Amino acid sequence: MADAALPLLSTFKANLGKGGGSARPNLFKVSIKNSAKAALSVLSTEEILVKATSIPASTIAAAPITYGGRPMKYAGFRTYDNWSTTIINDEDFKIRNRIHEWMRQISGTMDGDRNVSYGRYIGAGDTAVYNEGVGTVTQVNKSGLSGESYTINNMWPTSIAAMPVDWSTDGFMEYAVEWCYDTWTHVKPAV
């Protein structure tokens, strides 16, 4: 019985070793850019502070049609859940403050004060851009080269989490940001 398992294990190891082995969840890089106002983007030197995220998911909802008392399921629309990031807070709160400002530009200040420019297109004609951005998650291989890349399109921050402070806690402050978006696209690396 033990001999029968050996070909399965060696086959598994041989297949896992093709192309460099298994992708690692801790080898990635993230980019977050505001399309309308570059000053609200996460700078390339700060992207290392994005501690955690995910490759975005998508779901095709079922669209049932009932005939003769029985539901038949057809493919409906593709939907996307929010994209989440966890960011390590820098002592100057630079990234957090930029995300807050991005949110203010969309819907006004915390006390409800609004300006006619909030939430509107910036620019005119063909150059008008809504206050949205683009996020990119790129898997990095063990050689340090960029691999599969996912671009999150037309995104904006929908929530920024609280950051607890506590005398008995040691470590770094971090917070989660939820991003609403329209679609994502996938790019395979050139071979």
Image (spheres, grey):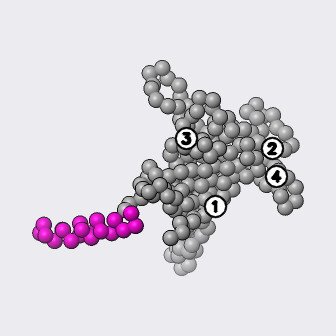
**Residue 67 falls in image quadrant:** bottom right
Figure quadrant of the N terminus: bottom left
Q: Residue at x 18, y 68 (%)?
A: 6
The image quarter in which residue 184 lies: bottom right
In this view, the residue farthest toward the top is 167
Classify mark 1: residues with Cα within 10 Å, few (<14), some (14-19) or many (20+): some
Q: Nearer the viewer, residue 183 or 191?
A: 191
Labelled disc at residue 49: 3
* Magenta-drawn stretch, dominant element (helix, strand or loop): helix
Q: Residues within 10 Å of mark 4 (few under 14, many from 20)?
A: some
Q: Please, what is the three-letter code of the amino acid marked with disc 1?
A: Thr
Disc 1 and disc 3 in contact, CB within 8 angstroms:
no
Under mark 3, the amino acid is Leu
* Residue 17, position as x, y percentages in the image: 34, 65
Label 2 sits on residue: 118
Residue 183 is tagged as 1
**Residue type at the position of mark 2:** Tyr
